[in-house]
Amino acid sequence: MSAYRLRGCSWTDRPIGARALRKASEMKTNGVASSAGEATPGLPRYAQVANDLMGRIASGEYPIGSLLPKEVDLSAEYRISRHTMREALRRLDEAGLVSRRRRAGTEVLAAIPAASYRQPINSIDDLLQYGEATEVRVRRKARVKCNAALAKMLGCEKGREWLRVETIRTRPGDRRPICHTTMYLNAELADIDARVEAVTGPISAMIETIYGLRITEIEQSMQAVSLDTAGARRLRVGAGSPALQAVRRYYDATRRLVELAIAVHPGERFVYVTRLRRQ
């Protein structure tokens, strides 16, 4: 039995307080080694500050529902620039600990970072029910006619029409996306545009239920990618962050392509698990 997991980079290390940072600086000035400095060799300042704030939140100094001090005040407390402070707060946001809103401040949402989403895939049924415990929001949809490149990807003639749908998937109670998906749905499916609007779960499962067809084959390819600026913004991570891209083609019993889905998962929030059994 084997398991394959993609995990993102973690900046979590031993928390270092603002006072400890200042003390370490003073001790180095006097030529004395600092245990705090030795604990995080080479750790960027924003990561040290993020770790310290995580510790303060976990300890209850900033309870759930409260607001962190203003960015300018935190910058002064830690003796760092506003830019560095914003990066530290972004890390807390990515960890699901806080929510940052203009003019409203930075609200504490959780005391500990949210765990990565684990997706077991061991069969076609698993793929069809993929993400049923999550929430799907349709960002945009439109009918598109295939150019040469898209026709090749979909295995159809140039000029054929498909329904292109973009969705964001989240976990209940956590607004951070765990997946951005671009789908191409077969326009031969009657009223597919309207059907998609009402979807809150897996679209492939909806297609089977509504249209009475059976998806008998799924072709899947996966690769590690680095997110560009637009992709990173959609998934609320930093540009250049690692991600897992999965391309899936869903075929019915007549070998007709019903759906092509391109799903992109942020590496730090998604774990893909597969079990292989020898017959």
Image (cartoon, rainbow, N blue to C red):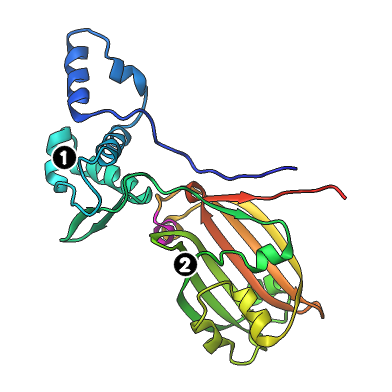
Q: Which residues are magenta?
A: 232-236
Quickly name the residue at label 2: 168
For the residue labelled by badge 1, is the local secondary structure a helix, a strand or a loop?
A: helix
- Assess disc 2: are there few (<14), some (14-19) or many (≥20) residues with their C-alpha within 10 Å of its C-alpha: many
For the residue labelled by badge 2, is the local secondary structure a helix, a strand or a loop?
A: strand
Residue at left offset 43%, top offset 58%: 235
Tell which residue pokes out farthest to the bottom in this image.
190
Give the amino acid at mark 2. Answer: Ile
Q: In the picture provided, is 152 more to the left or to the right than 240?
A: right
Residue at left offset 49%, top offset 49%: 116
Q: In the picture provided, is 176 more to the left or to the right than 266?
A: left
Residue at left offset 32%, top offset 35%: 47
Between residues 91 and 55, which one lies in front from this camera angle? 55
**Is-magenta flag for residue 28?**
no
Between residues 10 and 279, which one lies in front from this camera angle? 279
* Majority secondary structure in the magenta region: helix
Query: Which mark is on residue 75?
Result: 1
Q: Position of residue 74 (x, y in %)?
A: 16, 41
Answer with mark 1 or mark 2, whichever residue precedes in sequence.
1
Q: Position of residue 220 (x, y in %)?
A: 70, 61
Give the amino acid at mark 1. Answer: Ser
Q: Image height check: is 211 above or below 55?
A: below
Q: Image height check: is 253 above or below 227?
A: below
Residue at left offset 67%, top offset 89%: 188
Q: Position of residue 277 (x, y in %)?
A: 80, 48
Q: In the picture provided, is 67 more to the left or to the right than 226?
A: left
Tell which residue pokes out farthest to the top in this image.
31
Q: Position of residue 123 (x, y in %)?
A: 73, 60
Q: In the picture provided, is 70 more to the left or to the right than 39?
A: left
Q: CA distance from mark 1 to mark 2?
A: 33 Å
Query: Which mark is on residue 98?
Result: none
- Assess disc 1: are there few (<14), some (14-19) or many (≥20) residues with their C-alpha within 10 Å of its C-alpha: some
